[in-house]
Amino acid sequence: MESSTPPPASSSERGYKRSWKNLLINKRYQLRFTLFMVGVSALLMIALGSWVKRVADNTTEVGLARVRGEACPPLPEAPAAAPAAPEPAPASPPPADPAASPAAPAAPGDAPPRARVLIDESSLTLTEAPMSEQEFAKRVAAHRACEARQAGLIKDLESRRRDIGWVLLASGLLLCGGLAVYGIKMTHRVAGPLYKIGLYFGQMREGRYRPVYPLRKGDELTEFYEHFKAAHAGVVQAETTDIERMRAVVAAAGAGPHAPEVAGALKELQAMIERKEQALE
Amino acid sequence: MSDDLPIATSAIEGGGGAAGPEAGEAAHRRRLANYLLDRRLQLRYVIVVTLLSVVICGSLGTLIYRQEQRASYFLEQDLKALTEGDASLREFQAEVARDMESRDDALVGKMVGAGCALVLILSVYLLVMTHKVAGPLYKISMYFDKMSAGRFVDVTPLRRGDMLQDFFSTFQEMSAAIRGRMRLDLNAMERAAAALRAASPSENVVAELQRLDAHIAARRAQLP
């Protein structure tokens, strides 16, 4: 563990709760696993996201081409305010209907102007019937509506293209951030028990075999912890047996008086008993 | 095994052979068969990362496929509009539609293949990576089992590439300290027993000293 020298475990450790401050207790282990998870996700998001963006760009281009390719009704030429009356052909009869003349635009409620045919000696000219203002306005409106619709579609396609980029970026960042938090929390459930066992290791190294308390709820490595508890119990058992054996010898020797060598040996045994008993407290 | 240590050790004695912390274990190599040492710990991480990758690949792949399909649809519709009046181009139009459809299908196939390969590679890699954590824990567990049986053997180092080296060295120090202290205690007990025996003690003391000698001998046997 990278958690340097663990401070001695105290009784207050029993009531220890998770807090955000000490989520990262084994940086090397926790960051390695978390960064791997975040890295894989980031790589996938970048690779597939740029693919999505490229395909979306292509699709948008196709869509734009399609919209631009749609022909709008042509913009009609504005009706002439007072066009000169054409030279009437000699053979042609005088206009029967004065309303048909372009020089006289149809008054509201009049019949629509008719096409006029001029027949020359060797040619025939068809002159389009002049457009009424109403019709002109209608066609212009249709043209403008079509143009506006196309502009709206183009704007919509462009904004969708932009949105895809932003959505990908936002979801990628959110995913990586969420994963980093989740990864650290997940690995903390492994690093926590290891840290706790590390504290007990420190105590045992110093010759103190205090009781082992259970793990927190949600911690991993419960099986490993059970093995540790059994090992701790094994050491405690060995110490207890030593105490029992030495105590039996001291008791059998009685209170004395003893020869100085015997008294010295018994004193040494008594000191060991006391030290071992203290270690088990 | 001493009678003084009541913890049953037969199972541990037998179980420690294959992967236990014996002297020969120092040369223990990684094998594919025992990569999954701690299923819960390892599979949890493997499954989380693999599922995550599947979700990312699946959602973005679906997005790609839908965009491609949309583009194909646009093109198909445009072509249809262009060739509407010409019956001779109908076959061409159908051919182009088929071609685009098969390209979209191929794209799905490619993406599924790449996704499966990614999942497989990730799973194997993660298994190896988590094994480097589960391995040391497994090894320490074997030592714990021996300690619970009262046997305090010498701790051999981890394999190269294993993680939790710091944790393991803390364990190693602890184990060495306990072994050293136990040796000193046994020596002190032996000295005291010898001094008591030299002073021609009573029968009662002699009997207790015999028990103490047996205890010391048994403990020495457990401290190789």
Image (cartoon, helix red, strand yellow):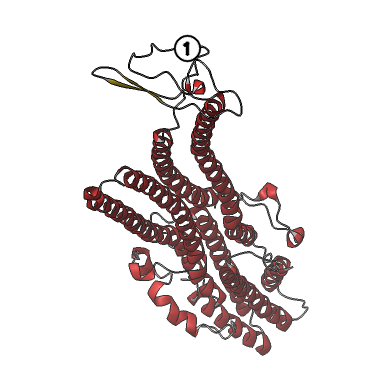
- Across the whole image, how many numbered discs are drawn on residues? 1
Determine crowd level at label 1: few under 14, some 14-19, many 20+ residues with C-alpha closer than 10 A.
few
The chain containing the residue under callout 1 comes to: A
Q: Nearer the viewer, residue B196 or A76?
A: A76
Residue B115 image position (x, y, % from top left): 38, 57
Would residue A87 be found to the left or right of residue A176 on screen?
left
**Rendered residue at 67%/49% (across/down):** A22
Q: Residue at x 65, y 65 (%)?
A: A218
**Residue closer to the observer: B142 or B134:** B134
- For disc 1, the marked residue is A83
Where does the image place residue B162, in percent across and percent down from the top left? 43, 56
Q: Is residue A144 above or below residue B84?
A: above
Question: What amino acid is labelled 1 in the image?
Answer: Pro
Residue positioned 59% across, 53% down in the render: A182
Q: Is residue B191 above or below residue A173?
A: below
In which quadrant is the C terminus of chain A drawn? bottom right
Residue B213 visible, this orientation = yes
Q: Relative to residue A120, is residue B42 drawn left or right?
A: right
Q: Is residue B157 visible?
A: no
The location of residue B14, given as percent across then percent down, is: 43, 82
Q: Nearer the viewer, residue B160 or A136?
A: A136
